[in-house]
Each structure stands twice: as structure tokens, then as C-alpha cells.
Image (cartoon, rainbow, N blue to C red):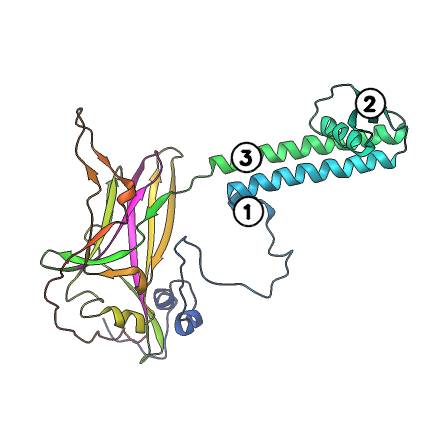
Amino acid sequence: MAALDPAVRTDDEEINRDLGFGSVVARESRQRLLNRDGSFNVRRKGMKSLASLSAYHHLLTISWPRFLALVVVSFMVVNAVFGLAFLACGPGALHGAPAADMGGNEFLRAFFFSVQTFATIGYGHVSPAGLAANLLVTVEALVGLLVFALATGLLFARFSRPTAKVVFSDRALIAPFQGATAFEFRIVNSRSNQLLEVECQVLFTRYSGKLGIRQFVPLALERRKVTFFPLSWTIVHAIDAASPLFGLSHQDLVDASAEFLVVVNGFDETFSQTVHTRSSYKPEEVVWGAAFKNMYQPPDAAGNLSIDVGLLSDFERVALPSPQPAVALPPPPVP
């Protein structure tokens, strides 16, 4: 292939250089690009708060404890507002059980009447009287129907949203492998569902001070794809003469602000959809001279295999083969 004019830069070359992080980030950032939980370590500023607000996306992606807490708080606040509105309609707006049943607290009487109306329970102990109170009941009944329909839709969407629950080992290892060394980490599916055609991509990124850019290099894996994923998978990159890690030490990775970006894709047969997850490892999360402990348990009486997921991140110290001579890595091709 003919050498390219340094002044010419194609779109494909630019994408291959920064992977979508942008040339400025790739050139100047020394921070982690991808967090362990898969989120990107990039902040977006300058947008108006309402312009970037997506209530539906937020309610789908927040944790279950926060979602349930938000539902409870919203339910209490809405009924408190309607309870105050019933009080504002006047002392004769509500008929039925006296406020004495609530310890003489008129607000509690109106609040619990609002709860019964909002949830379409209607015990009948308290009823509205007058035009204002009945109009308010009409409005609250309509609001209750809309809110419960929305809450039901959100609950269904949260339960039905296909996501991968692949757990990564806490540490990656530089371990012995076929007489040399390899970069390794383990993953396991923490759910009972089955993933098929699981594929992994690992990219090594480091900052080159001489070139003033951040390099992104795909790592060749010993096995890039597995058809079935019922157990664990140790992902291995052999460190040979063709590897960008060949001859590098832990300090070299630290000095270059290196990072290992991991993307895992698979087909979830439960939802019949492709799911994905991602994570990364920084040099301080890479252990040199170690090997993962065996997760497999002896077969039971019926001959069934099992693994101890609690041992996913457990490793033991081992001696590495004699270090190979360090070689200078060739610079990336000049675009």
C-alpha cells in the first residue's frame, strides 16, 4: 500500500485513531476514559439543564432503590397536595367520618381521602360535597389513572429492558502462558439466562509523549468469540513479539497512562436481542506474576459441572518466565 500524504487524513483513519473519543481527548487526556462500571469518564457542559433532561431515560436507568424511593415520595407528595386542596375547598367540602377519627387532624382526613380517590379504592367513609370538591375529585381521578398507567409502563420497561449482567474480575493479570506471558482477565454471566455467540474486543490505549497523541491498538486474543457461555471465560492476550505489550513493564504502563478497554457483546436468548457491556483496567488494576485460581468444582453424584463465582477474582502469585528482551515499539503509521 502506498504511503499516504501526511497532510491528508481520511475519516476512517481519524476514527481508528480515537475510537470516537475525539482527537482532542485522545491527544490531551491522561485520565481514565472508561470506568469499571462501563460509563464514560467524560463530562458534557454548556447545555441547558432542560435541553439535556430525559425523564424517561433517567427513570429507566436509575437503580431500583432510587426508583422505588422516587415512586413513594411522588405518591406522598401528590396526595399531600390534593389533601391541602380539599382543605382549601372549605370545612364542608368533605362529608362522612369525622376528623375526630384521625385525632382531630383535618389534614390527615383529607390526605387519606385523597389516597383512596387517587388509588380508586373508595371505601365510602368520606365523600365530597359541593361543586369545588367534586371537581377536585374529578381532576384527581384523572391524574391517578394517568400516573398509574405511566408507573405500570415504567415498571414493565424496566423489567423487560435487555441488559447484560456480565461480571469482570477485579484485577487483570500478567500470567504465564505457553512458555511466555499473557494479559488475562475473567468474566462470568451472573444471571441464570443464557448468552450465545459472546464476543470480546480488547483495545490497548496509551499516551505517546514523543508523538503527542494517544494510541489505540486492538489486542489479538487467544479466543475472540465463544458460541456458548454457561460457565466462566478467561480472556487471554498472548504477549509475543507482535504484541504492543511486548517488553513493557508495569512502570511503562503507568508512565504512558495506559488503559485496557473491554467490550463484550452477546445474544440473550431470553429476549432474543443482542446485549453488551463494557469495562476497563488501568495499570494499578493489573497484577504482574499471578494466575487465576480454579473456579470449577468437582462433579456431583449426577456428574453435573459447577463453578464457584465467588472465586472469579481470586488469584495466586506465580513466577513468570524469564523476561524477554525489551524492544522499542514502532510508532503508529503517520496519517
Which residue, given by chain and number where applicable, does mark 1 sit on?
57
The answer to whether residue 138 of the structure is visible from this angle is no
**SS of the residue at dot 2?**
strand
Which residues make up the magenta segment? 182-206
Q: Is residue 249 above or below residue 97?
A: below
Residue placed at 83% from the left, 32% from the top?
A: 106
> Looking at the magenta stretch, what is its main secondary structure?
strand
Residue 4 in magenta stretch? no
- Amino acid type at image mark 1: His
- Residue most extreme to the top: 124
Rendering coords of residue 236 (x, y %): 21, 54
The secondary structure type at the circle numbered 3 is: helix
- Whichever of callouts 1 and 3 sits on the residue coming sooner in the sequence is 1
> Visible in this render: residue 165?
yes
Q: Residue 95: where, in percent of width, then height?
A: 86, 23
Q: Point out the tag, 1 or 2, that comes first from the N-terminus.
A: 1
Q: Nearer the viewer, mark 1 or mark 2?
A: 2
Helix, strand or loop for disc 1: helix
Which tag is nearer the camera, tag 3 or tag 2?
2
Q: Position of residue 325 (x, y in %)?
A: 12, 72
Q: Amino acid at mark 3?
A: Leu
Between 90 and 99, the one lying in front of the other is 99
Residue under numbered circle 2: 127
Which residue is the site of mark 3?
Answer: 155
Give the mark nearest the N terminus, 3 or 2. 2
